[in-house]
Each structure stands twice: as structure tokens, then as C-alpha cells.
Image: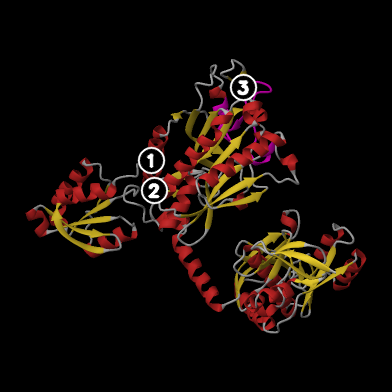
Amino acid sequence: MNVKISLPDGSVREYPQGVKGSEIASSISEGLARVALAIEVNGEVWDLARPITTDASIKILTWNDKSGKTTFWHSSAHLLAEALEALYPDVKFGIGPAIENGFYYDIDLNGKPFGDDDLAAVEAKMKELAKRDSQYVRSDVTKAEALKYFNEKGDPYKIELISGLDDGKITFYKQGDFTDLCKGPHIPHTGFIKAVKLTSVAGAYWRGDEKNKMLTRIYGITFPKQKELEEYIHLIEEAKKRDHRKLGKELELFAFSERVGMGLPLWLPKGTILRERLEQFMRKAQIKAGYDPVVTPHIGSKQLYVTSGHYEKYGKDSFKPIHTPDEGEEFLLKPMNCPHHCEIYRTKPRSYRDLPIRLAEFGTVYRYEQSGELHGLTRVRGFTQDDAHIFCRPDQVKEEFLKVIDLVLHVFNSLGFENFTAQVSLRDPENKQKYIGEDSAWEKAEAAIQEAADEKGLKTVAVKGEAAFYGPKLDFMVKDALGRSWQLGTIQVDYQLPQRFELEYVGSDNQKHTPVMIHRAPFGSLERFIAVLIEHCAGNFPLWLAPDQIAVLPISERFNDYAKLVYDKLKEQDIRGLLDDRDEKIGRKIRDAETKKIPYMLIVGEKESSENLVALRKHGQGDQGSLPLDEFVNRFRIECSAPI
């Protein structure tokens, strides 16, 4: 008996029932068979050795596929565990999943110390074991067999995991001398793992519960080629240099204070200039696109967020209610701007002729992120969104959505973000209780987003389970200069909040109708956007954005008066910068200006002061020659023009 196998190119082949993924790969090409890591069967990733007994759509997965990498790294976690067990026979194991880049394993060494200095020995053991080409062998076991095995081994964490599993759905995987509880899948054998790097050691509570024991978490990453590991290490070193927390301190952009509170950034003068320039850029673009600016309070009545549904869905991630002296009166720090904008819409009757109404606000919101999740500006407790809400008729949704896409693309093009994917974030069809609203409204909204993205020719990927609780989204996943992916701009179609807030407009039929609401934030949050921008350009901001655009550097104190004259003239032209009249050698002043990534240095000495010139240096490019100050100003104006 044969099974029909549909391939990614649309072709269909027949194979004997029970055919394995490895056999299918070999039948396609020897080259594919050599690099095949796993197989996707009807959307589920399997081992290549697992028999296929029914008709199926398949895809052979390699290192170039995300699921291929995930399988590779999950298998590497098992190799790490095998190496640890060989070196530390009494070790107890928690879990060892793949993560975005690499893997980790949580272990209990019964009080034995383990730190970064111990990683080298484990790493060497992993490489030794990998060369044995041990196969990853899957086996089905009963719950009783699984409990017996780990009871005899004395591994309490695995026993706890097994206790929560259903009998008949438990599998073991074995490679070499190591056996683990695992549902898989795995790569065919350890020989695929050619390059290994254990990166760090951390503490982690068992099952993420601080009431449980603290385990040791070992992080690592592996590759099929040594060259790829070397490239990754170089990338990590470059990422450290570009870390926005490091550059933010060096460039004096922002700071954090324990006295103010964790996750609440303080914007320093130079960082504030950067923020304000971005805000001005967006405000201009929004006015041109027909938005009206609004301002709303930093707090709101708890009932406002109960009505919107935010309290039910996000209450645990919000700060606790603020109680006033009036009994029963409660306020919340604003977690979202949209309920406030709904109330602005309700301030007067609306006609179909008034729509669309576009309300925009740089609104600061507050969310109680766990302390362990805070990370510089990318994960904070108070952040400002370039938020806007468009209230429109159903027949206007697509056109408005297209206009918002144009605005997002304008932002990305203006700031050098050229590599991005548009993620269509959909409901999880298996977990609809997470969302509000009727199926028909969701289907209309999802279709409108996909149609608009297709019409703009965007490269899209659909992801289930990533929608907001009130509607689907188009999230822009941007790759920075190091190839890392960040979620920045977002656009959302919402049929739910207008109903919850009883928003209405009078239609051409003289009847009352409910508008559709589009949420949009091209930056996302200013904090996160600036963090990504800093790392993307390594702190070398475009001239129009740079907090300090020029530095005037006198060669010695004799020329401070002329330097001050130059500086004042530039300041009159709204050119931002500084005058470095310290009693330091010019070489030191230049080095300091380079470190601060100031785009232009204007050096003045004997010749410049006597001939009304400036000697020009450009950051990272060196000497640009001497020229009259007016000529520099004209050149600066041409280069500095902000995007329109």
C-alpha cells in the first residue's frame, strides 16, 4: 500500500506506507539527504527516522530552516546533558529546550559549585561525544516504565514532569549512554554537531517558581560548521560594542535610578534632543497624513479599563489600583491609550461624513514588567507610544490601512531600516477564550490585513496566537545591521472596542452604525525604537538626529575667542553642538569627539582665525580640508535636511 506525499513545490509522489523522512530526502537528491535534519509532516516537525503511514504534506528541514535550527539546538541540549552526566555522575536534570539562539539545560549538582570556568571541560566533552555519531533513538514508553526508570536513576525533576503527563503519550530519546524524557524531534545523529560554544551560566528557579529550588542553567550554541560559530562569536562581540545600554551611558542619552524605580528611564539632555527630533519628524508626517493631535491623562478610572477589557486581560501586568480618599474610587496608571481616545470620540455626535477621524498622541503608558524581564530601554515599565487611533466606516478600512502602511514604510526608509518582514498576527484558533468578539468580525479583520499587505507587495508571514485580544495585527519585524529581528511598528484592526464603548456614527441611511477602529504605532514605543536605532547604527545617528552635530575644537587657549565666535554663529543657525575649550591637546579633543560620535569637528588655529576658516574633520572619515564657515553651513544644511 502506498501513501501520497505532497512536496513544497506542489508535486505529489507516491511512496510505500511507512516511508521515512530520510528515504524521501534521498529520493529527492543526495545533496538534500546529506544536510537533512528533520521533516515537517502536516505542519508538525518529526524525526527523519519516523515512519509516515498516511497521505501527508511534507517539507525536508535543513539548517537553513528555522525549525531545522530549533531541532539542531534541542538535540545539542541533549548532547550537553550527556556530557554533564559523564563528568558529574550525580547530576539531576530539569529541562533543556532550544531557544531563539542556541539552547540551555537546567541542572542540579547537589550543591557543587559550577561557574564559567567549568564550561571549557564540558564543552570539550561535548565535542568528543559528538564525533561518535551517536543516533538519536526515539521510543514510546508507558507512564509506569518512565517513572520506574527515573526513580531508579534518582532524578526527582523528571519524575515530577512525568507525573503531569498522560499515559500513552510519553517518549524517551537516547543517544550514546544518555536517555532523556522528551517528545522530540531530534536530528539523526550527533555527528551533525561540528562546532560547540557554551556561553554562560545563570541561576533559574525550577519551573520558574521562586518557591522552588534554584537550579544551574547552562547556555550554549552549536553549528554544523566551525566557520559559522566563528561568525556568530564575531557578531556577539559586535553586539556588545553596540549594546544600547553601553552606548546610552557613553553618549549620555539616558540613565536609570533605583531611587526613581526599576524600568523607569531618565532621559538626559542629549537623549531628550534625540527623542524630540523623532517626535517632530513623526508629528510632521502625521499632520501631512490628516491626524489630529490629542493629549490624555497618565491615569484613568479603573472602570475605563474594565469597559475596554484591558483590566481583565492585562490586570496582572498593570500596577495596582490607586485608591483615593473617596471610598470605592480607584484609578490605574494608564496601560493603554486607546480607551481614552474612544472617550474623545464620544464627546460629540459623529456623521459618516466626519469619518475617518484620526487621533494621534505621544502617550506615556505604564505596565508592571517583572524585574527579571526588564532590559535597558527594550523592556521598561514606563514608555511612550507614538499612538494613534483611526475611527472609520467599514468601507474605509482597507484604504486607511494602506495609508498607515505607507507611513510605517516612510519611517523605516528615513531611518535606514531596509530589511523587514510584515508579520500577520492572527488569533490562536485552539484558544479563542483569550480573545473577545465574534468569529465573523475576526475573519473580516484578518482578511482586510492580508489584502492590504498583499496590495503593497509586502513580504508577509502569518503567525497564529500573536493577535491582540481585541483584533489581529500587522507587526513589522525589522532586521538590524547585525541581522537581529525586532518587532517595531504595528497596525491593528479592531471591531471590538467601538462596540464596548458604544461608539456610533449616523450613516447615509440616517441610521446609527458602529465605526471600525484601527490602532497604529509606527515606532511602537519610543524607548524600544531608540534602543534598536542605537544598536542598528552603533550610535552614529543621521546628522538630522544627532544630539551634538558639531564640535568646535580650538588648538590651544589662544584661539578660544575665535572658537567661541564660530560656535555662536553655528548656534544662531540652529546647529547643535559643543565648544571644547579645555586646556587639552588637540589630539585628545579629537579622540573625545570621535568617542562621542559627533558627526563634524571644526578645528581652529592660527590659519583659521586669521583667514576666517575652519579645518573640517568628519567622524570616522578624518580630515576634510579647510573652508570658510559660511560654506560649511551651506554644506551642512544640504546634508542635514530631515526626511519629509
Any magenta on residue 319? Answer: yes
Q: Amino acid at mark 3?
A: His
Binning the other alpha carbons within 10 Å of mark 1 as few (below 14), some (14 to 19) or many (20 upward) gives some
User: Which residue does the numbered mark 2 point to in the structure image?
Assistant: 414
- Counting from the top left corner in percent of width and height, residue 339 is at 59, 29
Give the CA separation, mark 2 to mark 3. Answer: 39 Å
- Place of residue 204 in the rendered image (x, y in percent of width and height, measured from the top left): 68, 60
Pointers 3 and 1 in contact (CB under 8 A)?
no
Q: Residue most toward the left?
A: 610
Which residue in the structure is indicated by mark 3?
513
Q: In front of the other: label 2 or label 1?
A: 2
Select label 2 or label 3 by which is in front: 3
Disc 3/disc 1 C-alpha distance (Å): 35 Å
Q: Nearer the viewer, residue 106 or 356?
A: 356
- The residue beneath circle 1 is 281
Q: Is residue 330 left or right of residue 392?
A: right
Residue 187 location, x and y as percent? 70, 72
Question: Mark 2, residues whose alpha carbon is within 10 Å: few (<14), some, or many (≥20)?
Answer: some
Nearest the viewer among 294 and 515 is 515
Q: Give the numbered dot on residue 14.
A: none
